[in-house]
């Protein structure tokens, strides 16, 4: 058996952000250790796992020094892979995806323990599987402190139980990096940077619009950026009109347009946008709920404007609302008046009552509502 390293003897300062620590290690190439990744932003997860592989393996990302496990591994094979020294290299990477070794577990008796399981099946099989899972966790927990310093163990997990002994050992001797969807401001900066890398300029308001109408994951946004770049061709500046023309039509994008038509009292446009939303297979009941909610918010903002409320007070009533969505709401409220909005909100309630009592189909109630503009 190869001699063990001592990479785990030094723990990263708890005051440091784990992602910042990883970035520094990527710069210096000092990557031995264990890295646990979790979170719902797949783009960032894939990016940083890829950076570890690229830095540790120096271009040889498909050779003998990369070992990958998908799903629950045989713990002996996993440890053997970690124990083996790299071939003609300073590092090796052992990548484990969705092992479920850190998921919460519960025994078949129903008593919760720190690392108990919740598997289905006969009670005996459940107990055996839970016991095996617990043994594997304990085996790996005991192994990590003496893993060779030449090995990078990278684990990507959907479920992480922070109460488990294995998790505590990983965070004591390595890094847990949790990567959820970025906030709106961060995504706007990322979109602007993405266009700039293709030598195109986009105004922050247009970038905010793209973020507002798109799914929050970065893979989806990246695909939209690529489409818009192709659509604009050699033109350097990207506008909101370009985004409207090239980006994937979503319910979030159409509801902005539909409420613009409501504010303008333009029934023809409103009915056209309703058809667009229905073509996206959005349920009529949900569309009506969205129109009612947006109308209620527009009325609230109009009332605040009528009594000359300051920007800070207005912001407090719409805490957490996307900046672009609040801007659009303000533009719509300016074009409307309190009496119209209060009347239209009442009609929304009447349309909701009509389809719930069976007097009209959901679609007819929506069409009647928009025809009343």
Image (cartoon, rainbow, N blue to C red):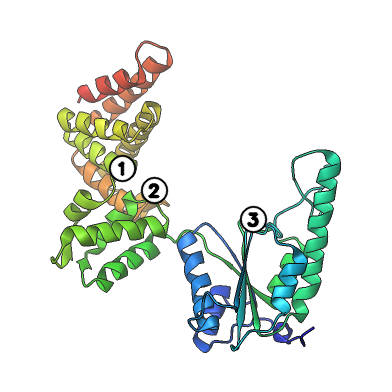
Q: Is residue 165 left or right of 236 when viewed as pictured?
A: right
Write the residue at 63% across / 58% down. Answer: 98
Relative image position of residue 169 (x, y in whole percent):
74, 71
Q: Nearer the viewer, residue 64 or 9?
A: 64
SS at circle 1: helix
Identify the disc placed on residue 301. 1
In the picture of the structure, the residue carrying the numbered disc 2 is 318
Q: Quadrant of the N terminus?
A: bottom right
Q: Nearer the viewer, residue 14 or 226?
A: 226
The answer to which quarter of the image holds residue 333 is top left
Query: How far apart, in angstroms, are the residues tagged by discs 1 and 3?
Result: 41 Å
Query: How far apart, in angstroms, are the residues tagged by discs 2 and 3?
Result: 33 Å
Q: Nearer the viewer, residue 19 or 267?
A: 19
Relative image position of residue 191 (x, y in whole percent):
32, 64
In the picture of the structure, the residue carrying the numbered disc 3 is 159
Write the residue at 35% across / 67% down. Answer: 190
Mark 1: give few (<14), some (14-19) or many (20+) Cα within 10 Å. many
Q: Is residue 366 above or below residue 90?
A: above
Q: Looking at the image, do the residues carrying marks 1 and 3 touch, with CB atoms under 8 Å apart? A: no
SS at circle 2: loop
Write the residue at 76% across / 86% down. Answer: 4
Relative image position of residue 40 (x, y in whole percent):
52, 57
Q: Is residue 30 above or below residue 231?
A: below
Relative image position of residue 127 (x, y in whole percent):
85, 47
Q: Quadrant of the C terminus?
A: top left
The answer to which quarter of the image holds residue 332 is top left
Q: Looking at the image, do the residues carrying marks 2 and 3 touch, with CB atoms under 8 Å apart? A: no
């Amino acid at each position: 058996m190869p001699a063990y390293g001592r990479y785990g003897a030094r723990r990263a300062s708890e005051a440091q952000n784990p992602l910042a620590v990883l970035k520094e290690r990527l710069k210096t190439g000092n990557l031995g250790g264990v890295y646990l990744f979790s979170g719902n932003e797949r783009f960032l997860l894939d990016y940083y796992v890829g950076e570890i592989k690229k830095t540790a393996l120096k271009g040889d990302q498909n050779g003998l020094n990369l070992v990958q496990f998908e799903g629950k591994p045989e713990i002996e094979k996993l440890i053997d892979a970690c124990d083996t020294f790299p071939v003609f290299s300073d590092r090796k990477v052992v990548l484990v995806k969705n092992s479920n070794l850190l998921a919460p577990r519960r025994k078949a008796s129903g008593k919760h323990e720190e690392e108990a399981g919740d598997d289905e099946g006969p009670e005996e099989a459940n107990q055996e599987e839970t016991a095996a899972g617990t043994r594997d966790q304990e085996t790996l927990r005991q192994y990590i402190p003496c893993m060779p310093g030449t090995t990078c163990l990278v684990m990507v997990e959907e479920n992480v139980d922070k109460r488990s002994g294995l998790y505590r050992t990983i965070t004591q001797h390595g890094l847990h990096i949790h990567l959820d969807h970025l906030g709106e401001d961060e995504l706007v900066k990322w979109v602007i940077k993405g266009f700039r890398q293709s030598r195109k300029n986009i105004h922050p308001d247009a970038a905010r619009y793209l973020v507002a109408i798109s799914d929050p994951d970065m893979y989806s946004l990246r695909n939209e950026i690529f489409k818009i770049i192709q659509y604009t061709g050699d033109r350097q500046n990207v506008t909101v009109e370009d985004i409207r023309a090239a980006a994937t039509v979503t319910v979030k994008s159409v509801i902005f347009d539909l409420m613009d038509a409501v504010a303008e009292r333009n029934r023809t446009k409103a009915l056209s946008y309703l058809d667009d939303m229905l073509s996206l297979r959005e349920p009529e009941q949900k569309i009506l709920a969205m129109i009612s909610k947006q109308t209620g918010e527009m009325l609230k903002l109009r009332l605040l404007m009528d009594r000359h409320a300051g920007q800070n007070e207005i912001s407090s009533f719409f805490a957490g609302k996307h900046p672009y969505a609040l801007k659009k709401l303000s533009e719509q409220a300016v074009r409307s008046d309190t009496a119209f909005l209060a009347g239209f909100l009442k009609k929304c309630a009447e349309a909701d009552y009509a389809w719930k009592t069976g007097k009209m189909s959901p679609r007819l109630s929506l069409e009647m509502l928009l025809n009343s503009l």
